[in-house]
Structures are given as C-alpha cells and as structure tokens.
Image (cartoon, grey):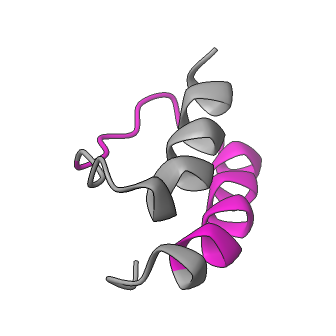
Amino acid sequence: MPDDAAATAQQLFAVLREFDALGVKLIWVQTVPQDAHWDGVRDRLQRAAA
C-alpha cells in the first residue's frame, strides 16, 4: 500500500475484495496513523473486520 492516505483508501477496497474472492481468512494490517487524513482507511478496515 502507498504511504499516502488517499491512495491507500482507493486501493484498499479492491485488495480486500480480492482477498475475499481468494477465501483469505486472516489479514494482518499495520496500524495506520492517527492523523485525520487516515480516518477513511481506519473506518474501512474496521468495517472489514466486523
């Protein structure tokens, strides 16, 4: 993933869908920065984990 929050947010959904299609059961994710720019990425990851 890119170091930029906006670019990461754009790519994250596609990667999560690909993992789902492959039947991936466990995904390790590095904690994203607490900066407000990363709120969308954090939200997407939390929803995927639910």
Q: Is residue 10 magenta?
A: yes
State the quadrant of the C terminus: top right
Q: Please identify the residue farthest to the top as the structure is shown.
A: 50
Q: What secondary structure characterizes most of the magenta part?
A: helix
Residue 14 horizontal/vertical position (percent): 73, 68
State the quadrant of the N terminus: bottom left
Q: Give residue 2's quadrant in the image.
A: bottom left
Q: Is residue 40 magenta?
A: no
Q: Is residue 7 left or right of residue 30?
A: right
Q: Is residue 39 left or right of residue 44?
A: left
Q: Nearer the viewer, residue 29 or 37?
A: 37
Q: Residue at x 29, y 47 (%)?
A: 34
Q: Residue at x 58, y 79 (%)?
A: 6
Q: Give residue 20's quadrant in the image.
A: top right
- Which range of residues does the magenta coloring cover? 8-30
Residue 13 horizontal/vertical position (percent): 72, 60
Q: Residue at x 41, y 83 (%)?
A: 4
Q: Residue at x 55, y 53 (%)?
A: 41
Q: Nearer the viewer, residue 43 or 30?
A: 43
Q: Nearer the viewer, residue 7 or 14?
A: 7
